[in-house]
Image: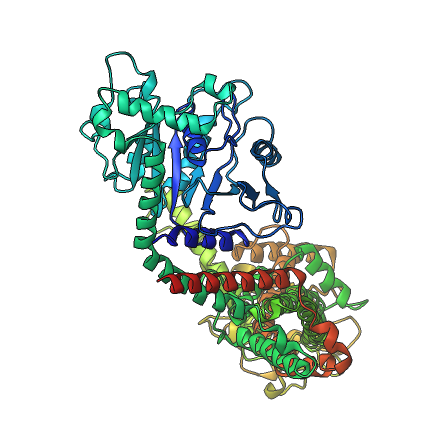
């Protein structure tokens, strides 16, 4: 039992060497309000004047005071400066000044003041950093006491404005620990209900199991009053009870009254006081010291099993932490090669696992690794392609200009196919930028994966880790160029050949159908609006409305258009003209062919197949219904036979051919005008017919034929662009996966081994981080301390 307190002091010394507070050691914490007599109680127990005194908060740092009784051979460690000094003298030693003993306790007071000012400053601030003081003396019992700043209410002088909060938080930090015994000091000349120390003790120890009360200043109570009810436990019961003491007065301190005389005066006070005479044997500083010694030893004995279990747990945790830093002996010269190879393989495996999604450290907070690459392909890249408009930066005037420029000096009978190619190629070029960005995003994600590989094993060797990242980054950078070039070539391949024979391409007939449906829809909407706005009863019985009459005229005209376009299948010998194929598989300057029906132009066939209508064949030479011009007159001009020649007109040739006429010709397919032998009056008539056709198809009523040509080209561009975009959206991710991602994951380990597995680099690569070496050394020291403390407790038990 007598060795338990030195045992705890020894443990405390062991833990103080590493500055660890992992173990809550049993100790007595002295708590009291300012000027309650705490310092006097401690000095009386030690029987030395060694604590700073003054006004305001004097104790501004916790003072861990270890009292060692030297009567049984408890001597301090030898010191070169005091080896010749008598060891029987009382002496003190600070933890921050090892191997230096203080025999003059006035110097101890000055050192406490200097050390407090060094850490806490001169402005009366509070610091949590403790001062460890050990006092060796024959006149003390083995004790471990912690002196804390006194509780103060109002800041005085240069004290901080929150001085009360600081002191309370510091006191609670110590007394909350379950292994602490609370020594609550209260002055007897103040009502116990106002005791700050007992209030704080009750807050953390509501059952008062580990609180012992001390009443000071009993000699200063008013005459006729006493604290007998408190000392006997009737007024405020504590399991460990109250002990009364009488300390030196301020006059005694100033006159340097010896401690022996102070203890004698205290004994006489209790023995001669009428109220305390019966309990004098349970009062006084000597009884307080013995009682504290007994309480502390019993407390240590009760807490030792828990301390031992806690140490055992800390040893296991510290060993696990130490193993995470790696064994430095394994990096010796004989093991460097295998260590390098092991780390290279681990890094490459982590890189591949992050891409494949098989890593054991997969994040649950955000997408990463291969999942992030998938997100780039399907979300980011797909959205970028969808945001590109097929006709971006392509105005109607640009399309008209391209149509005109593509014909050169020759007039064009049909919309030239080269105009479509000239316009669609720059639009396909717009897909190149998002495709290249897709490659760059995948590259950046692979670089990010590279930086996250290695884990704690690589934290030991920062230079090695940096080299690994550098090598993999070089590999990715080498693959970035070829991948980007291939993706660019994919766009160039799409632009090099415009395959209008693609099964998904809308073609000429499809474009015409789409335009006709759009025009019909607009006509229906116009008719509906006219019916809604016209007043009922305006049209008389037997009289057709203007809209109905106009539709019938248009129907007759459509029959005339069908017959006219059918004449295009027969061409005079020697005549050739460009035609836009609905399938794109013919020569854009190909001839219309012979008079045989089988040699009909593909475009004409496409037009004929796309123009709906149930009208029967109408003679090409006959005027349209209602006396309007035929489609042939509008499209080619009035090509009457020239004077003095036997050359028959196109009308006559068509009549003689006897070929069957297609019935579904759409008036939206209005081709460029060719004016041959046109008289001014005929030109005016053709313009009038063009305006009629424009009005008939509800297109913008300004440009007529050119607007329809523009819409046709725009429809073809949109159709082909969408086909190309779909192809690019499929091919680019495949190219990135093959040329960049898969190539990198398959060749990363070979590249790492070939670049870094060189004996001349082993020393540099396996150079440990300085901070990590310091952490390992600290962890190793803690492990040794825990093992030492465990052995000490194990031997004591």
Left or right, residue 298 beside residue 350: left
Left or right, residue 652 beside residue 556: right
Q: Estimate the x, y position of residue 43 in percent, counting from the top left.
A: 45, 32
Q: Quadrant of residue 746?
A: bottom right
Residue situated in front as seen by the camera: 603 or 182 = 182
Question: Can residue 702 be seen in the rendering of this structure?
Answer: yes
Q: Is residue 25 above or below residue 716?
A: above
Q: Quadrant of residue 795?
A: bottom left
Residue situated in front as seen by the camera: 432 or 574 = 432
Q: Estimate the x, y position of residue 323 in percent, counting from the top left.
A: 53, 70
Q: Estimate the x, y position of residue 338 in percent, counting from the top left.
A: 64, 83
Q: Residue at x 50, y 39 (%)?
A: 128
Toward the left, the furthest residue is 234
Toward the top, the furthest residue is 223
- The quadrant of the image that shows the N terminus is bottom left
Residue situated in front as seen by the camera: 357 or 732 = 357
Q: Is residue 192 above or below residue 776?
A: above
């Amino acid at each position: 039992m007598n060795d338990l307190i030195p045992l705890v002091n020894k443990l405390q010394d062991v833990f103080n060497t590493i500055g660890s507070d992992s173990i809550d050691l049993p100790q007595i914490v002295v708590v009291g309000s300012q000027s309650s007599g705490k310092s006097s109680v401690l000095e009386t127990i030690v029987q030395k004047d060694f604590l700073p005194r003054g006004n305001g908060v004097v104790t501004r740092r916790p003072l861990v005071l270890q009292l060692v009784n030297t009567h049984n051979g408890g001597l301090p460690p030898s010191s070169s400066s005091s080896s010749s000094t008598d060891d029987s003298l009382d002496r003190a030693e600070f933890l921050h000044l090892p191997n230096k003993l203080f025999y003059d306790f006035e110097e101890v007071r000055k050192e406490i003041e200097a050390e407090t000012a060094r850490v806490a400053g001169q402005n009366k601030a509070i610091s949590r950093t403790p001062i460890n003081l050990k006092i060796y003396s024959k006149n003390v019992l083995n004790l471990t006491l912690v002196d804390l700043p006194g509780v103060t209410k109002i800041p005085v002088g240069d004290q901080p404005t929150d001085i009360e909060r600081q002191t309370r938080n510091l006191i609670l930090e110590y007394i909350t620990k379950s292994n602490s015994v609370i020594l609550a000091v209260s002055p007897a000349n103040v009502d116990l209900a106002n005791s700050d120390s007992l209030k704080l003790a009750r807050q953390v120890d509501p059952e008062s199991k580990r609180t012992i009360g001390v009443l000071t200043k009993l000699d200063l109570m008013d005459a006729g009053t006493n604290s007998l009810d408190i000392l006997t436990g009737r007024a405020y019961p504590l399991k460990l009870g109250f002990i009364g003491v009488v300390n030196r007065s301020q006059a005694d301190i100033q006159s340097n009254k010896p401690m022996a005389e102070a203890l004698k005066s205290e004994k006489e006070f209790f023995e001669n006081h009428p109220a305390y005479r019966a309990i004098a044997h349970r009062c006084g500083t000597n009884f307080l010291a013995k009682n504290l010694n007994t309480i502390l030893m019993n407390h240590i004995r009760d807490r030792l099993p828990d301390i031992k279990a806690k140490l055992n747990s800390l040893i296991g945790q510290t060993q696990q932490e130490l193993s995470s830093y790696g064994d430095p002996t394994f990096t010796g010269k004989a093991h460097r090669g295998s260590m390098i190879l092991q780390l290279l393989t681990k890094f490459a495996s982590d890189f591949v696992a992050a891409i494949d999604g098989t890593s054991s450290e997969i994040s649950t907070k955000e997408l990463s690794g291969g999942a992030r690459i998938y997100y780039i392909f399907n979300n980011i890249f797909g959205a970028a392609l969808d945001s590109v408009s097929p006709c971006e930066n392509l105005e109607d005037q640009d399309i008209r200009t391209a149509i005109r420029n593509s014909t050169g000096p020759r007039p064009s009978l049909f919309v030239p196919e080269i105009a479509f190619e000239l316009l669609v190629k720059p639009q396909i070029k717009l897909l190149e930028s998002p495709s290249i960005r897709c490659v760059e995003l995948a590259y950046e994600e692979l670089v990010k994966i590279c930086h996250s590989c290695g884990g704690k094993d690589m934290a030991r060797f920062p230079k090695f880790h940096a080299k690994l990242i550098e090598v993999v980054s070089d590999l990715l950078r080498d693959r970035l160029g070829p991948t980007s070039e291939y993706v660019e070539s994919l766009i160039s391949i799409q632009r090099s050949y415009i395959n209008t024979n693609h099964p998904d391409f809308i073609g000429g007939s499809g474009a015409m159908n789409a335009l006709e449906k759009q025009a019909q829809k607009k006509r229906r909407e116009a008719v509906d609006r006219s019916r809604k706005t016209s007043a009922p009863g305006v049209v008389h019985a037997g009289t057709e409305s203007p809209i109905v009459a106009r539709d019938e005229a248009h129907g007759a005209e459509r029959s005339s258009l069908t017959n006219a376009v059918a004449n295009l299948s027969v061409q005079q010998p020697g005549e050739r003209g460009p035609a836009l194929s609905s399938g794109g598989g013919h020569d854009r300057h190909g001839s219309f062919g012979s008079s045989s029906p089988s040699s009909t132009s593909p475009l004409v066939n496409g037009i004929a197949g796309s123009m709906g209508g149930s009208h029967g064949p109408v003679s090409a030479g006959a005027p349209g219904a209602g006396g309007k011009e035929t489609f042939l007159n509008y499209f080619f001009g009035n090509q009457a036979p020239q004077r003095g020649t036997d050359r028959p007109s196109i009308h006559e040739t068509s009549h003689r051919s006897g070929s069957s006429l297609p019935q579904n010709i759409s008036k939206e397919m209005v081709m460029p005008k060719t004016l041959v032998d046109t008289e001014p009056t005929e030109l005016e008539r053709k313009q009038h017919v063009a305006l009629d056709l424009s009005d008939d198809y509800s297109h913008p009523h300004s440009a007529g034929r050119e607007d329809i040509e523009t819409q046709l080209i725009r429809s073809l561009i949109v159709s082909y662009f969408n086909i190309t975009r779909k192809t690019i959206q499929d091919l680019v991710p495949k190219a990135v996966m093959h040329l960049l991602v898969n190539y990198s994951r398959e060749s990363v380990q070979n590249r790492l081994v070939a670049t870094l597995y060189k004996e001349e680099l082993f020393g540099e690569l396996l150079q440990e981080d300085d901070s990590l070496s310091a952490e390992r050394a600290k962890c190793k020291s803690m492990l040794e301390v825990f093992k030492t403390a465990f052995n000490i407790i194990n031997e004591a038990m």
